Amino acid sequence: MADRLKTAFHRITSKKLPPLEEIEAFGGDGEEAVYRILRQHFDCVIRNLVVPHKELFLEKDFLVIHKGVPFVLEVKNWKGVIGMDGDQFYQNKDNGVRKTLKSPVGTTQQFLRRMKEFYALERRIYGMVVFAEPDCTLQLPTESQGIALLPVEKMVAYIRSKAKEEGRDAIPVEGDTFLRCTRFYSDDSEFCKGVLADCEIPCYTEDHRTALLDTTRIAYLSVEPQPLRLRDKLYVTFCNGSSGVFYNRDALLTVKLLDGSFEKIALNRVRHIVF
């Protein structure tokens, strides 16, 4: 009874959801812009890709699979003039300040090596660093140590071109098997980040039919309290851009945190989930 009262209190006191555009801004402006473009052009776009590494995880922003060919993307939202001095990146800002930046090439190479090991992949995985900020001038080679360095406007053409070069004889990969990091938000702050261990969310449709939401197909999930009915209304945006409305009562999701521990997350604690 006490748990039901807590749930009712949470739902009664929760704020209303902001517009979808504001919800999606949780992903970061540059990353979100890239995600919208990728969704328009490719069927398989996995956000927040992770692979286990030692006691924690390595993470990259996107995995795109086009015609069975995998592309791992790291998104940078750097402004000003971006260049390289040897293997080191630098940024010249409009105010004359020069700043040394950590190279995304080495971290992307490390991720690709670990990804191939973890999934026992024999084929090549293409690594890309995409610069999403419009106010950015690149003085970079198109590739460094096998990693493509591209402005966002050349991203789609590069993926299509490389997939076409691979042809029909390439070993295809499927997107369903890859781990992706999930972020949980309460109000305006992230309170949990990890790998969702439960692959399906029990819920039901507006006409009261039972349904299981496959989390590998979801991009966003927003929870709006329904206090008088002791249930939550779920606004779901799927990876292909379609959306739906579902309902749920007291679901618990098992999350493996980045430190290796597990936590049960109740949906009534959540306002937004970015998959």
Image: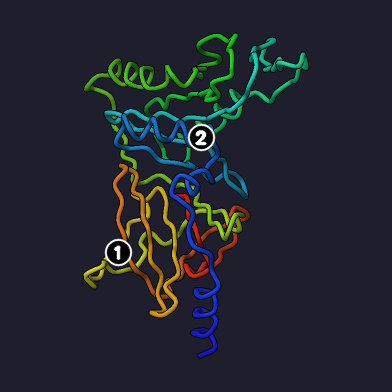
Q: Is residue 90 above or below residue 213?
A: above
- Mark 1 vs mark 2: give the one in front: 2
Is residue 138 visible to us here?
A: yes
> Which label is found at residue 169?
none
Q: Is residue 189 above or below residue 133?
A: below
Earlier residue among tags 1 and 2: 2
As drawn, is 91 to the left or to the right of 72? right
Amino acid at circle 1: Leu
Q: Is residue 127 above or below residue 14?
A: above
As drawn, is 45 to the left or to the right of 103? left
User: Where residue 207 sits in the image (x, y, percent)?
Assistant: 21, 70
Q: Nearer the viewer, residue 234 or 252?
A: 234
Residue at image position (33%, 48%) is 238
Q: Nearer the viewer, residue 215 or 134?
A: 134
Residue at image position (76%, 16%) is 95
As drawn, is 106 to the left or to the right of 243? right
Location of residue 29 by image quarter: top right
Amino acid at circle 2: Glu
